[in-house]
């Protein structure tokens, strides 16, 4: 187990090094940030001073080495647009995105997995067929269209939910959370629902297909022959046997939601990382772009490591394999 963790950590370091190079080179070729930093009518002397101040006159490899040196010290540089440390800027936006993503993924799992298990347990029932038919809509309808329709119905027509913003927050250990206030929940409901529909449909169909497959195995037949109740079979055997693919999808969806909740955050004016990266791309704010992409890479590596470790806890066969 320890050797496995060390191996994965070593792989994570290599992946981060490669990603840092790819990200830096990819961002470097995008536009000229000097056009954003100073006015178009500035003199050449001012332009040269600004270029030297930000190190844009150095060769690419030297800029990369300087970036890596600062990165190892936890310094991502200063934002060209906001004129503040990038780490401070990202940390100020990260709680909003993390709160939205975690709530959406957990909500999708709590609703989608039980519906999928029921649909797989009684596939011929009308309710199961309705569940599977509705889940197709979650894959088919674009997220931005669902978001606009939710705003039109609940915010414009009925006026019972706000169309955007984060609402009131409460600071917990310096982290602002809107999920702990009634007004915050009021603002959180629509973006969470919009963001969770696709993931809910995926969890439902995955749980349904896994349940149908597991119900035909000898394990379930022996459990029924032993007189175990159906609810116990579903809870102890079926859910455990289908848990590995569900955990995999949960981890990947959590990572993708944290990284790419751009559409939902834009539609609902949610002050998170998605809106920040869109603004940074449009304004050629290179330090923010590089730091954001490095953060996304780090989050995916951490989530994949946690998912791999959860396999060992869920499947005894993997523990035996690891021991050997």
Image: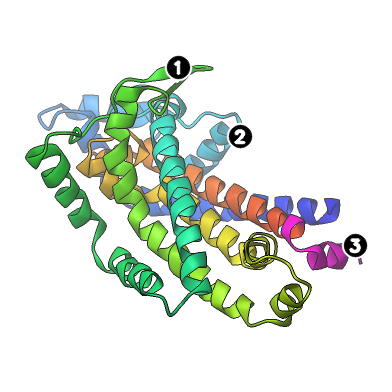
User: Which callout, 2 or 1, points to the residue nearer the camera?
Assistant: 1
Residue 323: give its label.
Answer: 3
Q: Position of residue 314 (x, y in %)?
A: 72, 59
The residue that label 1 is drawn on is 171
- First to last magenta residue range: 313-324
* SS at mark 1 in the image: strand
| Magenta-drawn stretch contains 66 | no
Q: Is residue 175 above or below residue 28?
A: above
**Callout 2 touching callout 1 (CB < 8 Å):** no
Residue 284 in view here: no
| Magenta-drawn stretch contains 323 | yes
- How far is the residue under mark 3 from the one under mark 2? 35 Å
Q: Position of residue 150 (x, y in %)?
A: 19, 47
Q: Main secondary structure of the magenta part?
A: helix
- How far is the residue under mark 2 from the one under mark 1? 29 Å
Residue 198 in view here: yes
Mark 3 and mark 1 lie on one chain; the one further toward the N terminus is 1
**Residue 132 appears in which quarter of the rendering?**
bottom left
* SS at mark 2 in the image: helix
* SS at mark 3 in the image: helix
- How far is the residue under mark 3 from the one under mark 1? 44 Å
Q: Is residue 103 above or below residue 1?
A: above
The residue that label 2 is drawn on is 72
Left or right for 270, reference 299: left
Q: Position of residue 196 (x, y in %)?
A: 37, 51
**Residue 176 appears in which quarter of the rendering?**
top left
Please state the total of marks drawn on the protein image: 3
């Amino acid at each position: 187990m320890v050797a496995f963790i060390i191996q994965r950590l070593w792989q994570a370091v290599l992946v981060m090094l490669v990603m840092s190079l790819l990200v830096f080179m990819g961002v470097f070729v995008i536009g000229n940030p000097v056009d954003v930093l100073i006015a178009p009518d500035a003199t050449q002397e001012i332009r040269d001073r600004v270029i030297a101040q930000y190190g844009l006159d150095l060769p690419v490899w030297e800029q990369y080495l300087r970036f890596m040196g600062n990165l190892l010290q936890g310094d991502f540089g200063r934002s060209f647009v906001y004129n503040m440390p990038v780490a401070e800027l990202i940390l100020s936006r990260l709680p909003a995105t993390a709160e939205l993503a975690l709530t959406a993924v957990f909500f999708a799992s709590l609703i989608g997995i039980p519906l999928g298990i029921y649909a797989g347990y009684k596939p011929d029932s009308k309710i199961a067929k309705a569940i599977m038919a509705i889940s197709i809509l979650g894959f088919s309808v674009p997220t931005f269209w669902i978001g606009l329709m939710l705003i039109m119905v609940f915010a414009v027509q009925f006026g019972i939910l706000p169309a955007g913003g984060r609402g009131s927050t409460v600071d917990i250990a310096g982290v602002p959370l809107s999920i702990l206030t009634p007004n915050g929940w009021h603002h959180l409901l629509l973006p969470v629902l919009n963001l969770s529909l696709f993931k809910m449909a995926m969890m439902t169909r995955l749980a349904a297909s896994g349940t149908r497959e597991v119900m035909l195995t000898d394990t379930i037949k022996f459990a029924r022959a032993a007189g175990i109740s159906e609810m116990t079979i579903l809870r102890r055997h079926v859910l455990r046997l289908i848990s590995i693919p569900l955990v995999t999808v949960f981890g990947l969806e959590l990572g993708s939601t944290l990284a790419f909740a751009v559409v939902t955050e834009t539609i609902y004016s949610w002050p998170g990382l998605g809106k920040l990266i869109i603004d940074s791309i449009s304004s050629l704010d290179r330090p923010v772009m590089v730091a954001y992409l490095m953060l996304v890479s780090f989050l995916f590596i951490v989530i994949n490591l946690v998912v791999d470790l959860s396999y060992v806890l869920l499947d005894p066969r993997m523990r035996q394999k690891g021991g050997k």
